[in-house]
Image (tube, rainbow, N blue to C red):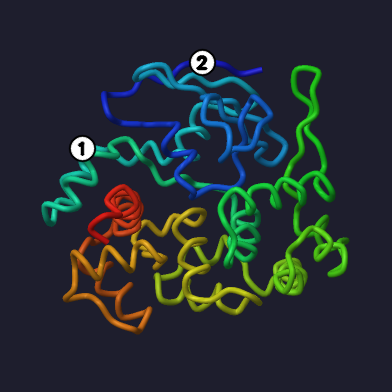
Amino acid sequence: MVEGVIELPEGELDLKLSMECGQTFVWNKWSGKPLYEDTSCRKFYKVHGEDLVLLWQEGTDLYYRGTMEEEEIYNLLNLDVSMEELEEELSRDEIIEEAFEDFRGLRILNDEFFPTLISYIISAQMQIPRIKRMVNRIAEKWGSTVAYENQEFNRFPTPEELAQASEEELRDLGMGYRASYVKETTEQVLDGEVDPSKVRDMSYPEAQEELKKLTGVGDKVADCVLLFSLGFHDSYPLDTWGKKVIGEVYPEFEDSRYWKVAEDMREYFGEYAGWAHEYLFHWGRENREIL
C-alpha cells in the first residue's frame, strides 16, 4: 500500500469541485453513494487499470492512499499545470478573470481513454447523474474487480471485456439508440481502428478527425475525449451553456458552425482553451439570470 500527502500552494486544487463539476464519470465517492448525488463526502476513488487510488483534501494538502505512486496522481490531476501560470495565460478579459477567481482550483482531469470515450458516447441527451449511474452499471456487469483492504471494487471494462456485451444487453441498461454506438465503437477500438497512443501525438485537427472515425463520435464527443483523456488542453467542447456564454459575452465568435466557434475560442484563449471552457461553463451556470 502507498500513502502520503502532497503539499500544494494555496488555490492550486479544489478537489471536490474538480470531481463534481461534470467532467468525469470514472471517479467515485468513497461513501459508496453516487458521485453527483452525494455532496457531503469529500473522499474520491477510482480504479485505474489494476490500481486503486483514494484521494481527499484538507486545506491545501492532498492526501492519497492505495496502490498508485505520487507521480501517477500528479498525472491524473494534471498537477504539472500551475494555476498561477494558467491564470496569467487565460487572462483575456474580465469575464474569464471573474470565472477563474470564482472557481479557482478547478482542474481538468486526465482520465483513461476508453471509459471516457464510452461515457461521452452515451451522454447525448442525458443528465449527468444518469450517465454516471449507467457507467457504474457497465462496470458492475462487465468489468473485473480490484481487491483493496478486504473490499472489491469494480473496474470499467476493457474493450475486450465490453465486446462480450450484446447490443440487447446494452439496451437493457437504458442506453436506447446509443447501445449500437457503444457496441460498434468498442469493436472498432478492439480492432485497432483508432489507437489512443497515436492520437496523442497528432495535431488537434488530425486527432479530432481520427476520433470521428468511431461510431457515435461527432465534434463535441471528440473534443470532450481529447480534453479529458488525451491531453489536448486546447480542445474546446461546445455545450449548451458554453454556447449561451459565447452568445452573451463573446458575440463576435457566435456562429452556427461548430467548428468555426471552437476554432475561434481556441485561437482566443490559446493552448489552455479547454480549461477556459470549463471555467466559463460554470460561470455561465452560476449567472443564469444574464443568459
Q: Which residue lies furthest to the front in this view?
A: 289
**Which residue bears the numbered disc 2?**
4
Q: Of 7 and 281, which appears nearest the observer?
A: 281
Residue at x 39% of width, y 68% of height: 238
Q: Of 10 and 283, which appears nearest the observer?
A: 283
Q: Distance between the residues labelled 1 and 2?
A: 25 Å
| Image quarter in which the C terminus is found | bottom left
**Which residue bears the numbered disc 1?**
84
Q: Where is residue 253 in the image (x, y as percent from the top left)?
A: 22, 75
Residue 171 falls left or right of residue 262: right
Q: Please, is residue 258 above or below residue 229 in the view?
A: below
Q: Please, is residue 259 above or below residue 265 in the view?
A: below
Residue 115 falls left or right of residue 141: left
Q: Of 276 and 159, which appears nearest the observer?
A: 276
Q: Of 173 and 217, which appears nearest the observer?
A: 173
| Residue 255, quarter of the rendered image | bottom left
- Amino acid marked by disc 2: Gly
The first of marks 1 and 2 along the sequence is 2
Q: Where is residue 113 in the image (x, y as percent from the top left)?
A: 59, 56
Residue at x 75% of width, y 17% of height: 149
| Image quarter in which the N terminus is found | top right
Which SS class for mark 2?
A: strand
Residue density around tag 1, few if under 14, some if 14–19, many if 20 or more, within 10 Å: few
| Residue 191, quarter of the rendered image | bottom right
Q: Where is residue 154 in the image (x, y as percent from the top left)?
A: 76, 38
- Amino acid marked by disc 1: Glu
Which SS class for mark 1?
A: helix
Are dots 1 and 2 in contact, CB under 8 Å? Answer: no
